[in-house]
Each structure stands twice: as C-alpha cells, then as structure tokens.
Amino acid sequence: MSDGDKKNEEKIILPSSDEAAKRVEGLSGWVDRHGRYWGEDEQFARFSGSTHTECRDCGAMVSKTYLMCPACADKKSHARYLAMPNKEWDGKTPLVLHNDDRYFFDWDEVVEYAEDVECKPESLPLVICEPVHLRTLDYDYWEDELPEDGELPTSVAEAVDALNKVICEQEPVAWTAGKYVATFKDPT
C-alpha cells in the first residue's frame, strides 16, 4: 500500500471533534511565555520563552540564536587565525580574508583593498585558498535502482568512467579558504 493510499484511509478529525484535543487537569510542570507545556524541562521552557541569552564567554546580552556576542566571536576567530600554520604565497593561488567572503585573485587586488581599508597589505588576515573541484560520479549512485548484487550495464559503466576522466581534467570551479595563513616574501 502506498503512502498516498494510507493517507486516503486515514481517519478524518476536525478541530471541533472531541478527538482533536482534550482538557487535562492536574498537570504540573513548566509552561513558556507562549503557553507551550514543557513538562519538567525548565531549561527548554525558559529558552523557548526567552528572546535573549548571555554570551557564554563574557556574559553580555545577545539574541538567543547566538552563543557569543560579536566581540567574543571576533576574538575567538582571530585566535583561530593566529593558530593556523603559515605558508609563503606562490603569487598565483587566490587569497581570501579570514572568515570573510572577500577573495583576491592577484596582488594588485590585495593592494587596492588594503588602501581602501587604510592598512598595509601584509597586515591583512589573508588565507591561501584551496581549489574546489567537481565531484566524480560513483557507481553507487544507482545502487537503489539495481537489484541486490546487480551491476551497471557495461555501456553505462564506460560512460561513467569517461565522464569522470573529463571531470578530473577540469580546472577548479571555485575556491575556498584553506588551512594556511599567507606570508609574503616579495609579492610584487
């Protein structure tokens, strides 16, 4: 029986029906400010009913959707950056500002950006990028369609191999922040 058939046979209950809800008396527990009952879970009730919380590092007030205030988050991010290993930039691989989406594809872009923010290019928190390549296709892609211990038809397997060869020969399709802080010998 399909899910659609099960839904068609499901019992219909309207909001006005006695089965839709019932009043229960004698319950005790925590209710948030919206009226949701949380039983004995005070922590969830308080979180659900709150709008803000305290930064877990400094205690400043922040929206409950964040664990830390912006200042503490920046400190933590900067500490991660300082802990990254250094590597001399090859002058070709793109660079990105740490924890930002500002990418640089040549030294002139770095210099121009540094002038805009009034600092030296070498003082920017630059990270050497890593290439993002297209993923190859795996034979397991069709495992749900094949019978147990079934194999792809030879022509399909050959086509997958040919496609994967073309994919592997492609240039990167994008770049992402890598694991090395860029250092500069003489970038000019």
Image (cartoon, rainbow, N blue to C red):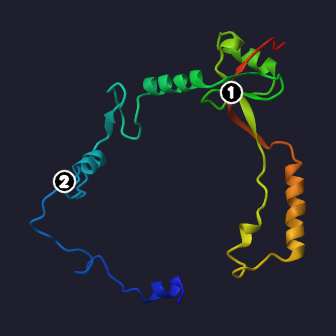
Q: Which of the marked residues, 2 or 1, is nearer the chain's N terminus?
A: 2
Residue 16: x and y, percent? 26, 78
Nearest to viewer (mark 2 / mark 1): 1
Tell me the SS state at disc 1.
Answer: strand
Image point 48% across, 22% down: which residue?
75
Residue 180's label in the rendered image is 1
Q: Which mark is residue 113?
A: none
Relative image position of residue 52 (x, y in whole percent)? 32, 37
Could you tell me the amino acid type at mark 2?
Answer: Trp
SS state under label 2:
loop
Total tally of numbered discs in the picture = 2
For the residue pair 184 and 108, the one nearer the viewer reads as 184
Q: Answer few, some or many: residues within 10 Å of disc 1's Cα (few below 14, many 20 plus, some between 14 and 19).
A: some
Q: Is residue 6 above or below residue 133?
A: below
Residue 10: percent from left, percent from top? 40, 86
Identify which residue is drawn at 43% across, 25% down. Answer: 72
| Image: 165 above or below 126 | below
- Quarter holding the C terminus is top right
Left or right: residue 142 versus residue 90 is: left
Q: Does residue 4 sit above or below 176 in this rendering?
A: below
Depth check, front residue: 13 or 160: 160
